[in-house]
Image (cartoon, rainbow, N blue to C red):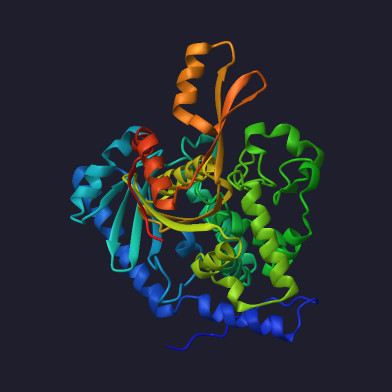
Amino acid sequence: MSRKKPQIARSRASGKTLRSILQSKLSEAKPYERDINKINSGARDIINKINNSARKLRVKLSPFIGGSLAKGTLVRRKPNEEANEIDIDIFIRFNREEDIDKFRSVMKATGEKFKVVHGSRDYVQIKKGSLIFEIIPVLKISAPKQARNITDLSYFHVNYVLKALKKNRKLADEIILAKSFCHGAGCYGAESYIRGFSGYALELLIIEYKTFLSFIKAIARLKNEAGQKLVIDIEKHYKRENVLREINEAKLSSPIILIDPTFKERNALAALSQETFMRFRQHCIKFLKSPSLKLFEHESVDVEKLKRKAQKKKQDFAIIEITTSRQAGDIAGTKLLKFAKLFNEEMKRCYNKPEMHFEYDERQKGKIYFSGKRIREKIIRGPPLNKAEDMIRFRKKYGAAVYEHGGRLMAKIKVNNDPITVIGQFKKMNGKRMKEMGITWMEIRG
């Protein structure tokens, strides 16, 4: 099927090579018309079933398509990419909060098989091949300040972005580039285990900067030294000097303050962490210095490179697979990452400056790539010299390794645990904490 050749907004700083790279990426990332038609057809079919079941149950509601599909900013992933499913958002607006309690009954009446996803408001997923339709109940409100849940703002977000795209149709292509690039940097998503850029935030950033290149240049210039923050207020809701004073302090911790144009009390980038921002900034600098299509592709952990690095430093290296019983997505990813950090912290008992790389499969599994130099000797702190009976027991236990220091007995013992033994000890010592965190399985694989 033929497609119109997408156009890239030109930059004075960009050369022929840069333009060709962006043109190539856009051609690759824009969905085919036939795919969009197929997705829209599937969404309309579900909406028709929802409307029919609502009529039968006499429930007043109004569904609408949201997210990237509604805005024309959907990104087509490569066929061989992992987790290649496409999420499609369908929102159901209910007139009253109590009507939302009928959401599941409405969905059951559609006859569709669905999975319930628990959150601040439960929603459901309907899987059809590689398409995952997420059906989300929201409250029908006339003004954003009436929102009782962040999802209640979705209707306003869609309309705001569509209005901007209607004024400047080139923005959609620039947004697709920004989303692809952010995905390549591993910074796409506001989930707790990523703490990066949401799709809506990237749409707003492109509306502000007009082009993908202008956006990443602005990020590259931001040093974020001494708490410096970039404040973006597209609709000029605040006088510049008043922004940081008038917004809730809890929403100002992110390095970029992006005032939601539809709701001025909200920072659309409140989830962005300093760590993720700095990683994204370095990705921007790298691309501007040496443009490459590879920087649009998310690279998995280079296991062989980590192994070689560990061998060169004479360190232990291990791959630890972990599984959680928690709900796939933000909850599972956050729990797995939290556990990985706990594991790395605990390994300091046996290793000097251990390093950890974490990878989440977007379902219920994760991998910890661990390396560190084994501690060969350990100092045991013994009893004071005025505790005769305790001293006898301590000497009996540690023998020739005992010595006196600072008014008490000490013992220097040799430690020679291999990774398998160390991880076995970790599991034994932290079994209760693993259970509390929903970790159901942990095994060394390398």
Image quadrant in which you'd find residue 407: top right
The correct choice, above or below, for 35 with respect to 354 in the image is below
The correct choice, above or below, for 257 with respect to 6 in the image is above
The correct choice, above or below, for 83 with respect to 294 in the image is above
Q: Which residue is drawn at 37% across and 41% down?
A: 427
Which quadrant, please, contains the N terminus?
A: bottom left
Q: Is residue 6 visible?
A: yes
Q: In the visual, does 51 lie left or right of 403? A: left
Q: List x then y, in percent, for residue 128.
A: 28, 65
- The one of 253 and 405 positioned closer to us in this rendering: 405
Q: List x then y, in percent, for residue 108.
A: 20, 48
Q: In the visual, does 108 lie left or right of 203? A: left
Which quadrant, please, contains the C terminus?
A: bottom left
Q: List x then y, in percent, for residue 65.
A: 41, 58
Q: Can residue 430 be seen in this view?
A: no
The correct choice, above or below, for 409 with respect to 291 in the image is above
- The one of 15 and 268 positioned closer to us in this rendering: 15
Q: List x then y, in percent, for residue 351.
A: 55, 46
Q: In the visual, does 238 lie left or right of 382? A: right
- The one of 282 and 317 positioned closer to us in this rendering: 317
